[in-house]
Image (cartoon, rainbow, N blue to C red):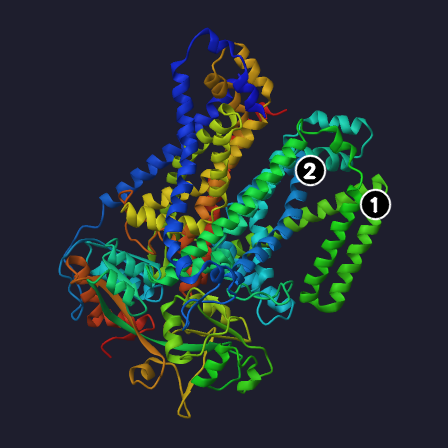
Amino acid sequence: MHPISTATLPGPARAARPHRGESAIRALWLACALVAVLAVAFILLFLVADSLPAFVEIGIAEFLLGETWSPTATPPAHGILSLVVGTLLVTIGAMAVAVPLSVATAIYLAELAPPRIRNAVRPVIELLAGIPSVVFGFFGLVVLVEWLRVSFAAPSGESVLAGSLLLGIMTLPTIISVSEDAIGSVPREFREGSLALGATRWQTIRRVVVPSALSGITAAIILGMGRAIGETMAVLMVTGNAAVIPSPITDVLSPVRTLTGTLGIEMGEVAIGSLHHHALFAVATVLLVITLAVNLGASAVLRRLNASATGRASPSRLAGVPGRAVAGAAVSVLAAVLAAAVAHSVGGMPAALAVLGGGLLLVVAVPRLSPRQAERAAFFLLYLAVAVVVAILAIILFDIASKGFPALSWEFLTGSPRDLGRAGGIFPAIVGTLYLVAGAIALALPLGVGAAIHLAEYQRENRLTRFIRSGVDLLNGTPSIVFGLFGFTFLVLYLEFGVSMLAGQVTLGLMVLPTIIRTTEEALRQVPQGLREGSLALGATQWQTIRRVVLPPAAPGILTGTILSIGRAAGETAPILFTAVVFSQRHLPSSLLDPVMALPYHLFVLATNVPGAQQNTYGTALVLILLVCVIYGVAIAVRARYQTTTRL
Amino acid sequence: MHSHRSTLILPGLVAVVIGALLVAGCTGTGGTATPTPTGTTTDNAGSFVPSGATGKISVTGSTTVLPIAQALAERYMDLNQGADIQVSGGGSSVGVTAIGEKTAEIGMASRELKDAETAKYPALEPIAVARDGIAVIVHPSNTVADLTLDQVREIYAGNVTNWKDVGGQDRQIVAIGRDSASGTREFFTEKVMGTTSTAATMLEKNSNGAIQSSVAPNPGAIGYVGLGYVDATVRAIPLSVDGTAVEPSIENVVNGRYPVARELYFVTSGEATGLARDFVAFALSDEGQQIVEKEGFIPIAA
């Protein structure tokens, strides 16, 4: 919307004097944007080339619809239906957990929380995005799975439910941060107008604020979903990895196996060049196709929302559409029935009936509430959601802090590991993680900001931008384990980087690139168009306008994206598993082509491979979280200082 | 004034990031610029004497072999201060590929080389450095005295699903095994399952440690791990061979009575040279094999 007017403005500056630098700068940003597309093209090329033999030999129908995955049996079976179903179930479950909690928390933080609480809670939520998936996996395995097994008297707690809960919790910070940014940037006049018309605060939130921020919230949910679908380490530690389709399908206590989990546990051991190896690449291809479908669907939804809500709060949206209440009720009834089926698998018939009855009661009762009652009920639910989020996060942090604290010592922080990491320290891993993150951000930040500037400022929507945007979407949805496979085949083997810091930095940089592009673009779009027009009218060139007028107010948004990226890069295990890390190293790396130790990988090996190292495992987890805290703390402090000078 | 400050924020951030990178780079160089100087080794009699080869090698592959290689590397670097040995995991195939593509000097494998691998990299040479018995483990409270190989097979095939059917309490069995590409799984299939296929409902884990930590808290669970992973949190169940219960122990693997045992390998490309050759020699020396035993595996020469 905005760039159209920018590009078509009869810029007085351009008429007055030609700017040779302008077109060079423009080309530079286009090049940045194309890197994302190029990366996707390479990833696709390598995946498809390696999966073709599997599709040919197994047959596409047999591969996609076969229910049995047992590639090493005689005869081998390569059907991935159960894996696809497992992925979908866990992702849907995670969204069912995360979306209500995180959107409610975002609304609370942006609309209801006193400034003191908001300023305290927001950094905490962002910090949580930095808890690495392998820490969640470890926590899930030793605490959550046990709790589920005992509470529901199940044979094993490793299940759809465990995966959904853990993934849901993991995606909370992402969805909350980005949604809250979106809600916070809805102009204050909208709220004032609505309240002046006599609407309650809840009506204002529900009918004005949330619809206006819907594109941002949707972007947040897509980001979260991307993380859920692509998550490997935590999922493979808690879902049991049995390649079965739950029966009935709503049995959330059944174990399942996801596509990512299959790659995560089998890729390291499979013989390169075997049919099984090609079949795993085919699994990765299917995973990419699913992400592509999700992303295309989501962007279609976004486009429709943007089209129907141009002007950010069109009158039709405020007035409400006839028949919407009926449709809403139908959806609610369906949801209640589904919830009842899930409850049945967990708690038997009484639980199912209770859930069904409660759901139907709500459907009948809600429309009959007065605006005041509705507001009180809604706010109660919001507060409840926030309390649940805070409690969950407090439990996880307390568990890790209390068990990890005894491990901390000067030797632990400054020494090299001994006795397989049961003794000694983790200094090389701390340094290695810093190297990897710094390299990844140094690569991704300029590229990402450049690409976003190209998308948001220079181009009207056309085929090229849609192409680039699809590339970014696809890159965003690309699971971290796929980046790992790509890094291994392309960087390590094909370009002969070897297992090296450089290969890890590039892999991680590519992985966080879409996050930076998305958040930067969103931030740029929030800058009022009038500012650009004013600047151009004063005779500034477009680049001068972007640099002096557009980028400064967008900086907090860009910083948020960078913070999320740092957190993700620091905590990821899957992309560096085959590209950058060694389990142990006595000396620090001396060049970019040396491999490094990294905290998340060290933690993963300690947690899954070294019995009797629990104290150092928790210690490593705690150090990783503290390290992320320091990085975030600096960034958040910078942003807070900056925000007080610009925001009202 | 406000706007002036704000324009500095973004370049400032970039500068901080790049600065951090530079500082990190300097630290790295400093770290390796001052390694402990190569000195004469002053060891007790009977210790392995390194050849004096120096430099840096990478050892990568099977997670089962990793603890052995790591312990060996730590001791070897104490003996030979000029050596830098980096150990990493990833899996047997990662190890075989790495050595085949020459991105590492030594690969680790918990299985024999596949035909596809020897065809692609004909120069590869597996060197057995340790033996390993695979123990069947259950929750410490499990009352089953011992199991026959047939019973274990029926459990993993999904035909026996309750402990009471094999002499235990009335409790559902949760079978836990390794992922299908694992060398350990392959070996278990060969020795125990034969041609019977594994039930799809089996929970799959990607490492020995993960199986152990899943079995430890779950009263209904059964799993299988390398001997080095048996500790007090789980109970290794004796396997009944011809009516006699055989404990999974180092002695019983050595004397050949325990039925599920295998070899673990270092893989080199052709004859190893320099530091890699010396490290392999250390692994096979008396001192090296003592380390193998200390890590809970079985020496190769025994």
Label 2: chain letter:
A
Question: Tag 1: Cα neighbours inside 10 Å, few (<14), some, or many (≥20)?
Answer: few
Res. A110 visible in picture: yes
Kindly identify the amino acid type of the residue bearing the numbered disc 1.
Pro
Residue A229 position within the rendered picture, expressed as x and y whole percent measured from the top left: 53, 51
Helix, strand or loop status at disc 2: loop
Residue that badge 2 annotates: A113
Residue A347, quarter of picture: bottom right
**In the image, are marks 1 and 2 on the same chain?**
yes
Residue A596 position, x and y percent, is 33, 49
Residue A295 higher or lower than A545, as above or below: below
- Numbered disc 1: secondary structure: helix
Give the residue at x 39% y 17%.
A21
Tell which of A514 and A438 is nearer to you: A514
Relative vertical location of residue A18 with respect to residue B108 in this rendering, above or below? above
Seen as rendered, the residue at the extreme top is A16
**1 or 2: tag closer to the N-terminus:** 2
The chain letter for the residue carrying disc 1 is: A
Q: Nearer the viewer, residue A286 or A114?
A: A286
Is B15 left or right of B278, judged from the image as shown? right
